Image (cartoon, helix red, strand yellow):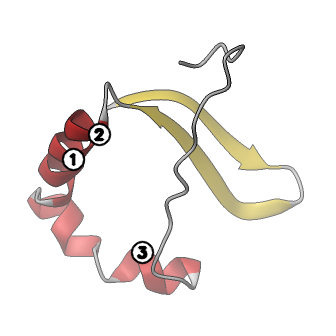
Amino acid sequence: MAVVGSFTAIDDEDTFVWIRRFEDDADRARVLESVHSHPRCAAVADTVPALVGRTETTVRLEPTSRSGLR
């Protein structure tokens, strides 16, 4: 998984954002399956949604034609 940026929110110390890049949808599915099936990830799978207060923690973005992150 290529993490091309990581950010915190200036006014919210509990917000952390990773911008990850995948080659295509198939690469995304393969990488996320590998990560999420790892024992360390499985051990916290129920904890993360409880900590963030929601079950969906992913927002999928599409870069614009002028974006430096493509």
Q: Nearer the viewer, residue 47 or 65?
A: 65
- The residue type indicated by label 1 comes to Ala
Horizontal relation, residue 18 to residue 15: left or right: left
- Identify the residue shown where x is 24% and y is 49%: 32
Q: Which residue is mark 2?
A: 25
- Identify the residue shown where x is 54% and y is 42%: 18
Q: Secondary structure at mark 1?
A: helix
Q: Secondary structure at mark 3?
A: helix
Task: Say whether marks 2 and 3 touch (CB < 8 Å).
Answer: no
- The residue type indicated by label 2 comes to Asp
Q: Is residue 52 above or below residue 69?
A: below
Question: Which one is in front in this view, the residue at disc 2 or the one at disc 3?
Answer: 2
Label 1, label 3: how far apart the Cα atoms are: 20 Å
Q: Position of residue 59 (x, y in %)?
A: 55, 56
Question: Which one is in front in this view, the residue at disc 1 or the one at disc 3?
Answer: 1
* Mark 2 / mark 3, whichever is N-terminal: 2
Q: Which residue is mark 3?
A: 48
Q: Is residue 16 above or below residue 62?
A: below
Q: Position of residue 21 (x, y in %)?
A: 42, 29
Q: Position of residue 13 (x, y in %)?
A: 76, 61
Question: Which one is in front in this view, the residue at disc 1 or the one at disc 2?
Answer: 2
- Identify the residue shown where x is 11% and y is 60%: 37
Horizontal relation, residue 35 to residue 52: left or right: left
Horizontal relation, residue 47 to residue 36: left or right: right
Residue 29 disc label: 1
Task: Say whether marks 1 and 2 touch (CB < 8 Å).
Answer: yes
